[in-house]
Amino acid sequence: MKRLSILLSVFLLLIGLGACNKECNEEIIPEPTSLKLNQTAVTLKVGETSQLTATVEPKDQTYTVTFASDKETIATVDHKGLITAVAEGTATITATVGKLTERCVVTVTTSGSTKIINELPVLKFDPTFDKETKRVNSPEILDHEKALGRVAQNITLGEDQTLPGFVNTNLTITAAIYGLYTSGTNHAIFAFSKESVDDCPKTIAMLAEYGFTTLEESNKGHFLQKLGVKDDDSTVHVTLFDAPISALQSTLQIIISKEYPRKGLDVAHALIPTVEDFPSYTDLMTGDVAKIKAFETSLGFRSYNAEKSDEAKVNLQFETPSAKQNETNYAWVRYVFTPSGGPKASKRIDCQVNFIKQSSDLNDPKIKEWFALNGFDNDFTNFQDQFVYAYDATGEIFCFLFIDNAETGAYLQIYKNPKTQSASQRRRLAIEHYESIKNDRPILPSTKL
């Protein structure tokens, strides 16, 4: 009996070793880390086909991708990813490998279908604006928005940012805003959709019609986004993310931006640090038109422009003629005694300088010399190539030099901003001011130097 027990144990051990040997020889395939489709939206007529191709990473492994249609009565898909249009409508094809999924929205039309107008904003990144209303007046945009039934209306983004746009909450794309800027030289158009980032077949189909046929998901910033590049123009990008706005009945925000090359600003000359050419904030505060004019005349650089001035409000414009451009660091200055609303609604002097070509020029140590010569030698600060500021001797008057975010010009502002107790507080206030103005359009069109 004992011998039988030993033989049985040996037999079981051999079976176990055999099983281990078989399993250990099998290659362990790693989980896929990425799944991408060659297209995320496609439009077909009934009977047409389109091939979906999946790319899975790591690429040195072999994976099986499965395809499925949520509406086979509209579009089918076989095991190789071949889509066949069956009937008019919209279907979503889902590709799956491991725990990863990607989707392609299929829009099927019939040969006799009437084309539905695309609700996305027209891709015009350089609109013109009415000088009085500040609203877009480009005919191409106005015609497009009128056809969609979107009407001109102010749109509030966040708590205190209101921008002119177009609204029709009966549409999927309920609103559009033109003529914005994102970072650097990017011109942007904003749109707002009733769909959400994880379920937006109509929006994706409209973007595909505009040439954004491939969108990739990203969790950058710890929230879901869809990102894409226009098929025929790598400088045009689209970003989709959820940012609900109840007044627009929208959930999804769409930013379409175009990057323009950085050319640098037009300049008249290098900085002249030895010239006393600052406008007078003291004379501005008197509200005396004659006194301000007399001061500017005494400088001998700038001429009064009556057409761009409003003497009743003591908002006065002075411009440097071409013959004087090489003698001063200013292209024009504007005394604003009666400001309109907004974050800069304080008595101030707005100026455009004519010596800064790019942001690195803000590092010129001669700027400090020029500021000091003109009475601003208190707490001079250069903040990370973004802006320069200093106070006058009283610590009450603030001088702020920057390039606007759209890189249309370099500007200087002078206004009352009493100096706070610490350097960190002063920097914080300067940063807040910069953030509030960097996306603003210039107070006046940039002067061609």
Image: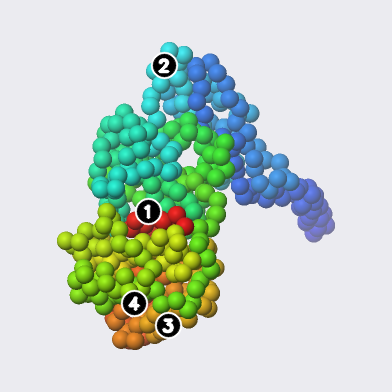
Name the residue that disc number 1 marks. Answer: 445
Q: Are marks 2 and 4 in contact (CB under 8 Å)?
A: no
Left or right of 142? Residue 186 is: right
Q: Residue at x 43, y 47 (%)?
A: 188
Which kind of residue does numbered mark 3 sit on?
Ala
Name the residue that disc number 2 marks. Answer: 113
Q: Residue at x 25, y 37 (%)?
A: 151
> Furthest-left residue in view?
312
Left or right of 217? Residue 392 is: left
Which kind of residue does numbered mark 4 sit on?
Phe
Q: Nearer the viewer, residue 48 or 25?
A: 48
Residue 296's place in the image compared with 179, above or below, is below
Which numbered marker is on residue 324? none
Name the residue that disc number 4 marks. Answer: 398
Which label lies toward us, 3 or 4? Answer: 3
**Residue 414 in sight from this viewpoint:** no
Residue 178 found in image quarter:
top left
Which label lies toward us, 1 or 2? Answer: 1
Q: Are marks 3 and 4 in contact (CB under 8 Å)?
A: no
Which kind of residue does numbered mark 1 sit on?
Pro
Q: CA distance from mark 3 to mark 4?
A: 13 Å
**Which mark sits nearer the N-terminus, 2 or 4?**
2
Name the residue that disc number 3 marks. Answer: 372
Circle 2: is it few (<14), some (14-19), or many (20+) Cα within 10 Å?
few
**Which mark sits nearer the N-terminus, 1 or 4?**
4
Q: Nearer the viewer, residue 385 or 327?
A: 327
Left or right of 154? Residue 224 is: right
